[in-house]
Amino acid sequence: MSTPKLVTYFTNDNERKVWCLVPDSPQWLHDAVYAAHQGDGPNDWIYEECRAACNFIDHDLDGYADAHDAVAEYSDGRVDIYTKDLYQWQADFCCTTTYAAAEDSLSDIGSDSDKAEKRVQILQYCAIEYIAQTMISAHTAALAEEEDEDESEAP
């Protein structure tokens, strides 16, 4: 089973592309994207990260022996490298549950970086890691459920 795709579905009044789920997406995907938002309102960056995670699941996840290593490497590769982009991300997310959860993860990691830019990179990494793990877990659960249904239907 490949993961359903998130697509640019419409442009808003400002002619900006807005990410959303395809209307006929399965319920597990809606639930996973909702969980990835961690209680925050719809956010294009989170939708884009969910889409990227689905793409990773489809194309790269099987190449890893350990799912934890896969998520860590994937998340590291998604972090912004330009200072302006990092600080814009921080400004956009500083008052969100996503950011607060990333700060909690940062304290669990125990990073003592005193360089502001590095700290924001680690916060963004934690947010991406959470989103990727949420999408992978939901996909894995959907696969297991699909296999269980197939087995129960077999003669």
Image (tube, grey):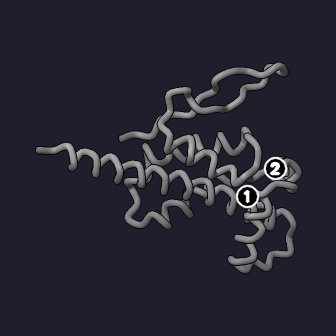
The residue identified by callout 2 is 89
Sequence order check, earlier mark of 2 and 1: 2
> 25 or 131, which lies in front?
25
On the rendered image, what quadrant is the C terminus found in?
A: top left
Q: Amino acid at mark 2?
A: Trp
Whole-percent x and y of residue 103?
78, 68
Tell which residue pokes out farthest to the left in this image. Answer: 155
Whole-percent x and y of residue 33?
60, 45
Relative to residue 79, is residue 119 drawn left or right?
right
Say few, some or many: other residues with alpha carbon within 10 Å of mark 2 (under 14 / 14 to 19 / 20 or more).
some
Looking at the rendered structure, which numbered label has been put on residue 2?
none
Residue occupying the point 55% across, 58% down: 133
Residue occupying the point 69% across, 45% down: 46
Residue occupying the point 83% across, 19% down: 13
> 154 or 118, which lies in front?
154
Check disc 2 and report its element: helix, strand or loop. Answer: helix
Looking at the rendered structure, which numbered label has been put on residue 124?
1
Q: Quadrant of residue 106?
A: bottom right
Q: Is residue 137 above or below residue 3?
A: below
Whole-percent x and y of residue 146?
33, 46
Q: Amino acid at mark 1?
A: Gln
Check disc 1 and report its element: helix, strand or loop. Answer: helix
Relative to residue 114, is residue 139 drawn left or right?
left
Do tag 2 and tag 1 residues touch (Cβ < 8 Å)? yes
Relative to residue 4, is residue 82 drawn left or right?
right
